[in-house]
Amino acid sequence: MDEQARIMQTLGGVSLAGHSVQGGMALPPPHGHDGTDGDGRKQDIGDILHQIMTITDQSLDEAQAKKHGLNCHRMKPALFSVLCEIKEKTGLSIRGAQEEDPPDPQLMRLDNMLLAEGVAGPEKGGGSAAAAAAAAAAGSPTDNSIEHSDYRAKLSQIRQIYHTELEKYEQACNEFTTHVMNLLREQSRTRPISPKEIERMVSIIHRKFSSIQMQLKQSTCEAVMILRSRFLDARRKRRNFSKQATEILNEYFYSHLSNPYPSEEAKEELAKKCSITVSQVSNWFGNKRIRYKKNIGKFQEEANLYAAKTAVTAAHAAAAAVQNSQTNSPTTPNSGFQMKDEEFQLDSAENKNTLLTNMFTGSSGSFNLPNSGDLFMSMQNLNGDSYQGAQVGANVQSQVDTLRHVISQTAGYNDVLGGNPMYSPHGLNGNGGWQDATTPSSVISPTEGPGSVHSDTSN
DNA sequence: CCCTATGATTTCGG
DNA sequence: CCGAAATCATAGGG
């Protein structure tokens, strides 16, 4: 036991010195005890330790030979186990000092962003997808998708660089890790290196490499941001929609004035017709609603224009029927329809609308009005739902004049075609919202909409 | 260069 | 997530 303690003491010093190779040579044997018997062995141990300490100073072959010699030394197992014990003690304190790695929030943020941008995500086609997008963009006349494909091409470029770099880092990391692990494993035969320590070493290496990765991610993020600001932000440099698109949108808007909220399908259709996106349609209607409501007066002309236009369009469809049912007595148009007057005792203007509408709807059964059966809707549609009407009547050409005649003979209704501000925004209630089309209020004077009408936002 | 129109974005409420 | 409202930023006309 006495001897054991001595060895321990000696090794304690050596082991620590060996850790941060600074001893250079074995410590002198500790003093203060009777050491007459173990002198030879002490010499032995000192020799071994010296060899261990200086092993790195020697040439490879030499060291290899020496190592082998050490490995076969009779004292080796005992020494080694003691070294391990000591190491265990010091190792604990080291391990306690630096605990598990925290899931770096910065890295998480970068990862999330890269994922969101589609840079880090699954390879979903990669360049081929971009090529396809470019091809699609080239094929279609949608002008903003050209920029978009450009953006995507650049993005996929970034993505490619990112991936190759990442792969490179990963490979290097793995190589280095295995190299170090082999080294340590090899050394663990002569030095007390526990598997846990190897693990720790590996994790340190990984941390180092992941910090490099983070730099890569960081710069990739920056690149994406720059790209975004160059392209996507350029969408703020808006292009006005084509005249035709605006036309179509306005037609829809004014023909659904009582409820200008296109359904998803309607939006899609409008988007297709206008060569814009659905969200652009939504934007347009959002803007239109708010701006219309804010200053109805300003939109009167436009409203009348489109009302007239659609009325005329509808007229195309209806003209034929109108013509052969009665061309000479338009003042009593309800003769041929099953209208019940008592149900339509509204003010005269609307009554006229009703008459005309019923003329149209009654004579041409192909008017599939959204709320068919609802006469108020029909009235409002006269103002007029040309959406379906345009399709139905597109081929009728020559009856415009007839219809004009019919309309003008319908007392007072020539306002519609004349463009006078008689157009009434049905369905827009006084609170600044569009109410349900099925419960229309009485007509609001166009010049007395919610809030000031003619002042605009002169703030 | 100013002014208005207009498409897009942001903010806020349901 | 949708829509209202406010706001931003540019287009486009004079």
Image (cartoon, coloured by chain):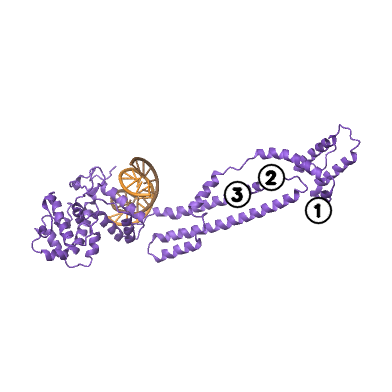
Chain colours: A purple, B brown, C orange
Q: Residues within 10 Å of mark 2 (few under 14, many from 20)?
A: few
Residue A196 is marked as: 2
Which of pointers 1 and 2 indicates the residue nearer the eye? 2
| A71 w.r.t. A390: above or below | above
Which of pointers 3 and 1 indicates the residue nearer the eye? 1
CA gap between label 1 and label 2 equals 26 Å
The residue drawn where x is 87% and y is 43% is A44
Q: Mark 3 highlights which residue? A: A210
Which type of secondary structure does the marked residue at label 2 adopt?
Answer: helix
Total number of numbered labels?
3
The residue drawn where x is 23% and y is 64% is A392
CA gap between label 2 and label 3 equals 21 Å
Which of pointers 2 and 3 indicates the residue nearer the eye? 2
Q: Are marks 2 and 3 on the same chain?
A: yes
Amino acid type, mark 3:
Ser
Which chain is mark 3 on? Answer: A
* A370 with respect to A223 (left or right): left
* Front residue of A321 and A299: A321
Q: Mark 1 highlights which residue? A: A64
The residue drawn where x is 74% and y is 41% is A87
